Each structure stands twice: as C-alpha cells, then as structure tokens.
C-alpha cells in the first residue's frame, strides 16, 4: 500500500527529489560488491575460458586475438576420452580415495586422542606432525626415489598411496583436532555416565558431531592428492600415471595443443569440483548445535 | 537408591601442589538430598566428580550402597549426572537423549518409550520429544537434562550447578521443582552449587567446603544458627553475618565506645580460652535500628537497600579502629523488617536484639562457646 502511495507522489511531484531507496545508493557497500564481482570474475574467468576452449578446434584455440565466436565441437573432448585418459583418471581416483580413507582411518583417532584425551607431550606430538611438512619435498625426492625403487614400487600406484597418506596425515590431524576441540568434554562424560563404552560414545555422540569436520578434512585430502604432481611425475611412468602427469603430456616438443589440453583439464577438474559441491552441504553445517547453553 | 559415604577421600590434580579434595568424610543417608557448597576452588565439584567416577580417588574411598567405588568406571556406578551445561547430545532428539542410557542397558524399544514418555510427562516435555536440543530454550534443556537422569532410575543423582545457566526467576522456580522431584523419587542426591541460597533451600543437609576441606556438614538451620567457624558464619546468610575482631571487656566486648554484653557462659568460654580479643558475629537481623540518641552502636549509613517488604542498611563506624576479619576497617549491615528508617548519611544506632551473639577465635576462626 505505502509503496503505491509513494510512487504516486513521485509521479505527481517530479520536481521534488524522490526519496532515494537505500538499495540504489552508491555507497561504500556497492563499491565493495563491485570489487567482489571483479575479483570473482577474475578468478572464475580462466576456468570458464578453459571449458570453452575445450569446445574449439585447435586452429580456433590458438589465435592471437582470442576468438569469442566459433562453431563449438566435441572433437577435443571425444579425442581426449579416446586417447586413454580413462586409465589415468582411474589411477588418480584410486590413489585419492584409498589415501584419503587411510588418512581418515589414522588421523581421526589421532586427533581424537590429541584433543579430548591430552597428555603431557601432546603439544610436542602435534609439533612433530606439522614439522614433517617443513622439509621441502624436492629435498626428499632422491632418497624417496631410491627407497621406492628398492621396494619395487616404482610406477606402482601404491607408492603414491603411501606418500599421499603421509603427506596429508599431519594436515588432517591438525584440522580434525580443531574440530574435536569444539566438542565439549562433558559430552563424553555424560555418555560414560549413561553407560556407554568409549567406542559407543565416540560412534553415537562424537562422530555425528564432527562429521562436518570429517567432510572438510576429506575434501582437503582429496584435493591435495588429486592435484599432486611432483611425486607422481617422479615416481610413475606409464602404469601408474595420474591425471596431472597426463595433462603435462599435452605440452609437447611440437607445441601446445591448447584445445585438447583444455578439454583434458576440464575432465581433470570435474571430479574435484563435484566432490566440493557434494561436501558443501556438510561443510556449512555448524559444529555444535545446542550442546552447550 | 543407596547411601553414600566418603571415607577420607582425597583427590589431587596432576601438577598441583595442593589437594583439590582433602580427606573428605561424609556420610550421606539413603534418599537424602545433600548440597555441597563453597566458593570457587573449594573442591565441591571435584568431590562430586569423584563420586561420579569422572575424577580419580587418589586417597581414601567412596562407597555407594556399601560397595567401594575405587577403580569402578563411572558407567558401572549406576549414577546419573546433570551437568552445568547440560551436555545434551546435540545430534539426538529429546526423546533419544532421555532414552540413551536405557538403550545402552539393552532395554527394549517399547519399554524405553514408555519410560521416556513418563518422565517427559513429569517434566512437561511431551511435546518436545522429537525436537533436537538446539531448538529448545535454556529452561527446557535443563529439564531434558533432568529427564535424562530420572529416566534411568539410578541409585544416585549427581548435579553439578544445574541451575547456573538459567535466569534468576527461572532458577528459583526450577529450584523448587528439583527439590520436590527429588522428594517424590526419593533418590539419594548430591548437589553442587556456589549459591548459598540454593544450598539452604534445597538441601536436607549441607556440606560446606573451603580449600578442599570440609568445614561443616549439618542441616541448613543448624548451619545458620550454629556455624562452627567464622568462614561458615560469613558464607551462610545473605547479606552475610557482620564479623569484627574486637577487644574483650568486662561483661562483654568493646565495639568502639560501646559495650556489647555477652552471656555468662560465653564470657566463661572466652576466659577459658584466655583471649583478650574475639571475633564477634552479629547477623543483620540481630541488630535493631534506632535513632542517634538511642542506646547502641553509633554508625553512619552508607547505603540503603530497599526491597519493598524489608530493607538493609549498610553503615560504617565513625571509629575506624574496628576491624573486619580480613583486617580492613569494618562495615556493618542491619536488616529492618519495614521500609528503611534512615537515609544515606544519617547517623543511627544499632542495638543487639535479645539472643546470642556468635563468637569466634580471632586467629583460628573456631566457634567459642555454644
């Protein structure tokens, strides 16, 4: 009702300045939203360009003034699928899933112990975990190569699984610990007073509470293992090749195959994007809803 | 249901140089409601957690129903606990929260539901059984925590400041509900609070702790009328008892220029102890407020608290020599059963009414005389 009246007044008296609605004001708020849009587009555009380039012919993809209008084709995507991306995708998926599961299996109990059952040396143990991330991987690759060669796991996906597990474990322990710290210790006490064993109270009370944390941690591990390049390029060749190594194969001595590389990269990015999208639901859910006052 | 007894029970926290609970002896009868009260750091919560099995018993023993509980895990003690922050399982509904202990004991779904329904009815929670704790108000959560405890029909209830997260009005209301509920169920209850009003109103008996040591274990009226030492005297009662250290004179004690007369057996006790100074304790209602030229202690009013049906005068002595027990110059509180008869800045007299003044040893704080 009031809106109509206001509008009516405006029309009848155009000389008086119309009451400016707050949404239309150009204030600091809109400047920030403009900045946010620009930043968002700046981040998203290369990804979009990659997907689009995948639909081009090589000739269209490699023009000095980028072609915006072109006849889309599925040739590149089809070509990538036929050139054996399937094996490398499977390798990556296997290494990622198995190493993430191993990390959760080892890291969640460790984080539980380090947060809800702390002992004197807890801080030192935590520091030890994170200190394993301080050595540059490059410095360790030669001994690693020798060891992996000695145990006969060169070009074997299990070598990567072991390394990815070791690589992600400290991060997972630290991340999960911060989630466990949010759980009030009274919940465990309450469960034990209610007659639950430690395992039952963890399963029935603690794990459901930290499930968003487990989702977040898994996602991080999945992303890191999926995108890992350095170990993969040094320790695998044909059999155990993973997707990042496969992508590099498009940069050849004869030149870059932009369109095909883009199509392959789109395939490579898709699983991680999907994983993030699925995890999102879990991630945004708050941790403690009503445990404490 | 069972009797509880703390036998010389002690607890020390790792790295601490002092016992959190120091040789505690308490005999709690079957069905009794006992309140542990004391200032923070007095060890009252630790004493309760020792009973619940959440804190180790480092010395002595605790018996429940005659059985020694040292080394028995809390899940096997048949105790229900209500936590200060309730510690409800956030991922479970109210009904599941209340039924969890029964489920752990392997009680069938049908019986579990029946018992949960019963308890919910008792606590007015029936319509909330399917909600998650996060969707409830503070008072409702508190009732769910109570419900979770009573559904189990345990031998003992342990309650660790269960009302401290509620607002003042709800706290008073819930206080009476809990006391009534306990009387109805007849379950032995140990209740921890720092609020002496809760202690006085709820407990059959009250144990007062300070620095891990038991000061006095008695009924609320006994605590009020016969505090065993100056700490208990000052802790129980609101406003607190007036306590000052004053010289002994013939026939009484000298408060400034005035003599406060004491009873004959009190004088004998002082003489027997060979003291020339004592700590005198007068409750605010033991003082009668008179005008400046009446007989009594001459004081100047600093503050008036008007409560409508009664009022309190906070006053100081013109003579700064009179010391409170902590060594600072003393102030005095008097209760008037009506509206305040004086205003800030007025000079009034306070006269001791009929009845016994409390006397304590100026150094040890022990009670002197009956």
Image (tube, grey):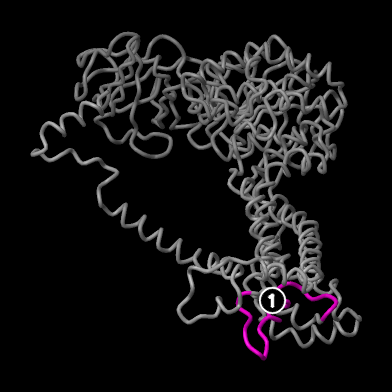
Q: Which quadrant would the C terminus of chain B be assigned to in this image?
A: top right
Residue drawn at x 67%, y 28% is B82
Looking at the image, residue B6 sits to the left or right of residue A293; the answer is right
Q: Is residue B370 visible?
A: no
* Image quadrant in which you'd find residue B49: top right
SS for tag 1? helix
Tell which residue pokes out farthest to the bottom in this image: A253
Vertical position of residue A115 compared to residue B295: above or below = below
The residue lying at 45 percent from left, 29 percent from top is B279
Q: Magenta span covers which residues?
A: A238-259
Q: Is residue B253 visible?
A: yes
Q: Chain of mark 1?
A: A
**Image x and y of residue A84, in percent:** 79, 72
Q: Which residue is mark 1?
A: A247
Foreground residue among B239 and A177: A177
Q: Is residue B124 above or below residue B217?
A: above
Number of residues whose C-alpha sits closer than 10 Å to that of mark 1, classed few (under 14), some (14–19) or many (20 or more): some
Residue A281 in percent (x, y) is at 62, 45
Residue B100, percent from left and from top? 77, 28
In the image, residue B97 lies in the stretch drawn in magenta = no
* Of residues B217 and A99, the one drawn nearer to the viewer in this rendering: A99
In the picture provided, is B78 more to the left or to the right than B267? Answer: right
Q: Residue at x 79, y 21 (%)?
A: B155
């Amino acid at each position: 009702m009031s809106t109509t009246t206001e509008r009516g007044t405006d029309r009848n008296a155009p000389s008086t300045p119309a009451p400016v609605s707050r949404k239309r004001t150009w204030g600091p708020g809109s400047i920030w939203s403009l900045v946010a849009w620009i930043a968002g587009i700046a981040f998203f555009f290369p990804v979009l360009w990659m997907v689009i380039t995948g639909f081009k012919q090589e000739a269209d993809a490699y023009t000095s003034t980028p072609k915006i209008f072109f006849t889309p084709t599925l040739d590149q995507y089809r070509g990538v699928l036929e050139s054996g991306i399937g094996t490398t995708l499977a390798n990556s998926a296997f290494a990622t899933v198995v190493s993430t599961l191993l990390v959760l299996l080892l890291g969640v109990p460790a984080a539980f112990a380090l947060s809800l059952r702390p002992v004197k040396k807890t801080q030192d143990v935590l520091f030890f975990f994170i200190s394993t991330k301080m050595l540059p991987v490059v410095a360790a690759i030669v001994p690693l190569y020798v060891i992996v060669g000695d145990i006969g796991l060169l070009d074997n996906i299990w070598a990567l699984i072991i390394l990815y597990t070791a690589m992600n474990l400290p991060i997972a322990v630290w991340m999960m610990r911060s989630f466990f710290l949010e759980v009030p210790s009274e919940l465990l006490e309450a469960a034990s007073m209610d007659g639950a064993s430690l395992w039952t109270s963890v399963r029935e009370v603690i794990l459901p509470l930290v499930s968003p944390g487990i989702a977040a941690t898994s996602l991080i591990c999945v992303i890191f293992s999926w995108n890992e390049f350095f170990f993969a390029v040094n320790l695998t060749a044909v059999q155990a090749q993973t997707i990042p190594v496969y992508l590099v194969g498009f940069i050849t001595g004869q030149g870059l195959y932009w369109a095909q590389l883009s199509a392959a990269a789109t395939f490579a990015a898709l699983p991680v994007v999907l994983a993030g999208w699925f995890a999102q639901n879990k991630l945004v859910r708050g941790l403690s809803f009503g445990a404490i006052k | 249901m069972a009797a509880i007894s703390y036998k010389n029970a002690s607890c020390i926290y790792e790295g601490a140089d002092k016992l959190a609970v120091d040789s505690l002896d308490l005999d709690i009868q079957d069905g009794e409601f006992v309140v542990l009260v004391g200032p923070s750091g007095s060890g009252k919560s630790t004493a309760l957690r020792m009973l619940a099995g959440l804190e180790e018993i480092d010395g002595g023993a605790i018996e429940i129903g005659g059985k020694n509980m040292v080394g028995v895990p809390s899940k096997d003690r048949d105790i229900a606990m209500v936590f200060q922050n309730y510690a409800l399982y956030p991922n479970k509904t109210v009904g599941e929260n209340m039924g969890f202990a029964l489920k752990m004991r392997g009680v069938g779904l049908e019986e579990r539901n029946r018992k949960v329904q019963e308890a919910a009815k008792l606590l007015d929670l029936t319509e909330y059984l399917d909600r998650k704790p996060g969707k409830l108000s503070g008072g409702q959560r508190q009732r769910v925590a109570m419900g979770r405890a009573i559904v189990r029909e345990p031998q003992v209830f342990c309650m660790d400041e269960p009302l401290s997260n509620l607002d003042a009005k709800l706290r008073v209301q819930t206080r009476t509900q809990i006391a009534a509920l306990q009387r109805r169920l007849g379950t032995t209850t140990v209740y921890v609070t720092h609020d002496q009003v809760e202690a006085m109103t709820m407990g059959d008996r009250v144990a007062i702790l300070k620095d891990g040591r038991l000061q006095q274990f008695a009924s609320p009226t006994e605590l009020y009328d016969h505090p065993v030492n100056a700490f208990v005297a000052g802790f129980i009662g609101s406003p607190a008892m007036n306590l000052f250290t004053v010289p002994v004179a013939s026939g009484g004690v000298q408060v400034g220029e005035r003599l406060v007369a004491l009873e004959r057996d009190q004088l004998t006790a002082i003489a027997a102890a060979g003291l020339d100074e004592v700590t005198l304790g007068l409750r605010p209602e033991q003082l009668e407020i008179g005008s400046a030229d009446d007989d009594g202690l001459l004081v100047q009013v600093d503050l008036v608290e008007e409560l409508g049906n009664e009022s309190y005068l906070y006053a100081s002595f013109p003579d700064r020599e009179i010391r409170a027990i902590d060594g600072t110059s003393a102030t005095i509180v008097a209760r008037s059963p009506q509206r305040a008869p004086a205003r800030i800045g007025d000079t009034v007299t306070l006269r001791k009414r009929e009845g016994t003044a409390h006397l304590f040893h100026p150094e040890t704080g022990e009670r002197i005389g009956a």
